[in-house]
Image: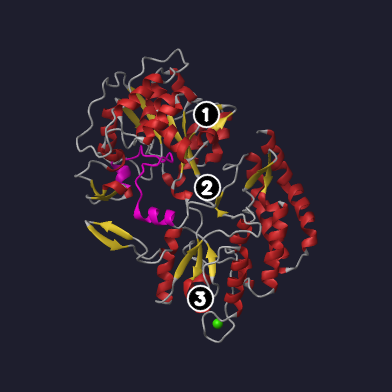
Amino acid sequence: MKGKYLKLAIALGLAVAILLLVVFFQTEPPADPATTPDPPAPPVAPVTAPDPPAQPAEPFSEHFTISWVGFQMAPLGSDPFILRYMEEKFNVTFDIWNLDWAQFDELLNIRLAAGEVPDMFMSRNPGDLPRYVQQGILAPIPDEYIQRYMPLTLQNAWTEQFPGALDLGRIDGDVYGLPAMNRGNRFRQPIMYNGNWLNTLGMDVPTTIDEFEAVIYAFAHNDPDGDGVNNTFGLSQDGLNVLWGMFGMVPHQDYFAERDGRVVFMPIEPEMREALEIAHRWFKDGVLDPEFVTGENHGGDWAISHPFINQRIGMTNRANFGHYVMPGTWMEFIDGAEVPNNAGRVTAEMLALDPDALVVFGNPLYNRDGVQGGVRGWNLLMRFYSIGAQVLDTPGKMQRILEIMEYTSGASHALGDPAGITFSRGFQGEHWDWTEQERGQYRILDPHTDTSRFEWGGILWWVSGADSGARSRAEEWAESVNLHHGGIFSVLPQGNEVTARYNAHLETLRQTSYIQFITGARPLDEFDDFVAEYLAQGGQAILDSINASR
Ligand SMILES: [Ca+2]
């Protein structure tokens, strides 16, 4: 692959037709001799092109019927005009399965078991991919095809935005799943402090472990709410993530790190003993809320930390920044006017309790050795999109599917339609229109919900992880406070059959043991015994299966 040419094209804005054509013709031909003459890539136009796309230089001459199972939360309606538009554009007929989203996995598996395999299908749970490969129902997707038919997605999403992402769907050397990567999840869990408490105490948002300790001890002992009563704590269960993260750890059963070429469990790494000793001290000193054992969410909206919004604790690390942002943090641009953003869902609840409440954001802490830690990042890999093995029987069909996937991946905003929104939302000016085009912001003109989008046939949309370059003002703000830095991710974003067997038990064992170590019910001298138990009760079986398959 002529990667440098692709890079150049990307650098020039994904929009320069001549360069892309150069790339196209310099790409190595697919190795498959059964391949029919290849249709050219869809036409390329600048993102801002006001005119409708030009016709392809050569139309897609051969017609295919493609069965398609994708992200679809409602069945097609009586007039799926967006789907018809895409059928005409790519000279295909879609056979849409309309699987009930609430029973998606069950319904798909029933039909797979009966030997019915869709030509293009989505694994909602990426962990299912190895099983499908084992069952022989997936076609390997040649790297040459991906390079040739999905060059923008490959370069933008799986090389620049998420390097190596394509390898997530690779089994025994072949790609069986095109990865759907969540760009929203590149923002790690946010770290929040009670801004009024910091102001009252005359302290800044902490950046190092020593500053952090000074702050949480003051939150617990110096009456930050000024009511003369000793009724506050520094942090609770979620806030401990910042401590674990300072050691580079997310101690959950599905977080793995790589050490000396081998995969290891984060919850039983030696750093965790050191971290647990600190947590135990915070507990003993009345800084860690003794209610940490039951967690910070007491029901209702999962994003809420109840002790934080009730101002019992002074910091937390939970949910997404959008849940905890203060009103007026950035300006939105709606219907031609700038308006302040609304309070986040959780901040709104907190402001209802205390109209003067103030939430401020911090960053992962620097350890005493000067290394900055992180906090848990959300899973970047969401789903896989695969191609049924039977597609190999029809020359040219896999190529067409990949071209459609390229067009709808989000990397193809330069490929003709107004920012590619047509394939999911309908026609500009009729169904939607820009509010801030350079930020990719638009509004819906019709009475239009996500459900009607699916009814109209806007179901080919998927999220490859591509970056169109447009930034919402919310994203711009999040990047300005470094929420896209410091996420800790597992080296294995998907489990296997063995992890599925032991996960629940190991997580219970881990939680119980950590609580005992933190409260002092069990001395930390026994940390090595805990590690041995963890390995004996499934941990070793998991590590052996994972390391054997790498
Ligand atoms: Ca108090």
- The answer to whether 241 appears left or right of 89 in the picture is right
The image shows residue 199 at horizontal and vertical percentages of: 48, 76
Q: Are marks 1 and 2 in contact (CB under 8 Å)?
A: no
Q: Earlier in the sequence, mark 1 or mark 2?
A: 1
The magenta span reads: 451-480
Instruction: Describe the element under mark 3 as helix, strand or loop.
Output: helix
Residue annotated with mark 3: 197
Mark 1 neighbour class, 10 Å CA radius: few under 14, some 14 to 19, many 20 or more: many
- In front: 43, or 406? 43
Is 469 one of the magenta-colored residues? yes
**Which label belongs to residue 379?**
2
Applied colour scheme: secondary structure
Mark 3 neighbour class, 10 Å CA radius: few under 14, some 14 to 19, many 20 or more: many
Is 312 one of the magenta-colored residues? no
- In front: 234, or 463? 234
- The answer to whether 485 appears left or right of 51 in the picture is right
Q: Which residue is farthest top?
A: 33
- The answer to whether 425 appears left or right of 531 in the picture is left
* Residue 424 quadrant: top left
Residue annotated with mark 1: 175
Above or below, comparing residue 123 to residue 373 in the picture: above
Q: Amino acid at mark 3?
A: Trp
Q: Earlier in the sequence, mark 3 or mark 2?
A: 3
- In front: 7, or 464? 7
